[in-house]
Amino acid sequence: MSKTAANELQDLQYFGEFGGVNPSISDSSTYTFLSAKTMFDTFEGNTEGCYLYTRHSSPSNLYLGEALAALEGTEAANVYASGMGAISATIMQICDSGDHIVSSRTIYGGTYAFLKNFVKKFNIHTDFVSITDLATVEQAISPKTKMIYCESVSNPLLEVANIEALAKIAKKYNIPLVVDNTFAPLTLKPAALGADIVIHSLTKFINGTSDCVAGAVCGSSEFCLSLKDVNHGAGMLFGSTLDSLRAASILKNMRTLHIRMQKHSQNALFLAQKFEADGFRIAYPGLVSHPGYETMTAQMKPNYGYGGLMTMDVGSLENANAFMEFLQKEKLGYLAVSLGFYKTLFSAPGSSTSSEIPLEEQHKMGLSNGLIRFSIGLDNDIERTYEMMKSCLKQLKIVPKTTSV
């Protein structure tokens, strides 16, 4: 019987140093050696199971990395101090001066800024394309292209990437497909669909408690080791190492990920269906009206639903701000960035998480001023939540403008 990702995580089992049911936390920045020769071998990367310095690795980070590799079905995984730490290390490990990247145009604002502005310092250039237009993606590839980069479900527009089709294009040109799967852990398995490298912001759903910042790169053992190379590893030399205490905390929270994702998805689907029926402009991959519905349905693991993110367009930034402030006042969630928390989080991405993207580009991709991104929480009575949200809209006299997605 083949194992699911949830089963792989369930079967991971470690004894702590003194027999505890949680592995002991390695609360050390440096490690001792019984011989100088072993220290030399460890610096050279020739010794398995030895620890030198926490920027290289630590037992706590390796435990978490093993769990993330099981989650994504990859050979290995490295953990970092943030999602951007994981993203920047991956990109700079693969690309050299003069190289080219094909990226989705709808991605997290920090990633967009890194690809649009920062890597230009190293003569690396990026073409941003509609990732759902496979012909355009392929046409953008040149002899200098070193990767295709996308998000499985894009931030903030919730476009769904056809990972299997993109992987075929990438393999045709012998370049890696890098997929940020932050929005869809367990729901989508990019590596099983052909992606070469899977990235996560662990800050979000995987940790689930909005109390730390962390990231991960899941891929082949060879690639993960290359990131840690003392001479050429971007992960090593950028120094974006995850603290061992946080690694241990995230590992514990991963044990409930399957339960949380089911509830996030269940609640988001309920609200999306209700508000769409009310006539509001809703984007959610679980709605039949969503352009990516069929792609998402074909790729996903149905046990975990269509994810916990939905967007609602309320017509203007003034409406969006008033609605979000009212929701927070009524204790229905927080006007805050990020996602995956037990309470609903909401923000207007055009003026927050996607503000790095120029306004003209936002308009081209369909990111309107009135768009609100909701990370739907774990509300036990989602019908009550819907009625309260509807009441807020009514009191603010916000009415549907269009029903198209």
Image (tube, rainbow, N blue to C red):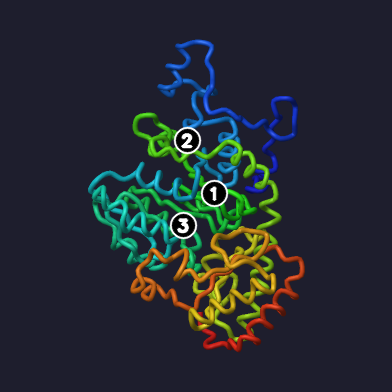
Q: In the visual, does 279 lie left or right of 19?
A: left
Mark 1 is surrounded, within 10 Å at the Cα level, by few (under 14), some (14 to 19) or many (20 or more) other residues, namely some
Residue at the spot 47% in from the left edge and 42% down from the top edge? 219
When the figure is inspected, residue 146 is found, relative to residue 394, above or below; the finding is: above
Q: Nearer the viewer, residue 89 or 104?
A: 89
Question: x%, y% of residue 395?
Answer: 65, 86
Are there few (<14), some (14-19), or many (20+) residues within 10 Å of tag 3? some
Residue type, numbered disc 2: Ser
Q: Which residue is mark 2?
A: 221
* Label 2, label 1: how far apart the Cα atoms are: 24 Å
> Residue 374 is drawn in which quadrant?
bottom right
User: Who comes first in sequence, dot 1 or dot 3?
Assistant: 3
Tell me if 341 is positioned left or right of 149 in this view.
Answer: right
Disc 2 and disc 1 in contact, CB within 8 angstroms: no
| Residue 371 percent across, percent down from the top left | 50, 75
Q: Amino acid at mark 3?
A: Glu
Q: Which residue is mark 3?
A: 164
At mark 2, the secondary structure is: helix
Q: Residues within 10 Å of mark 2 (few under 14, many from 20)?
A: few
Q: Is residue 365 left or right of residue 287?
A: left
Tag 1 residue:
213
At which x and y percent is residue 34?
A: 54, 11
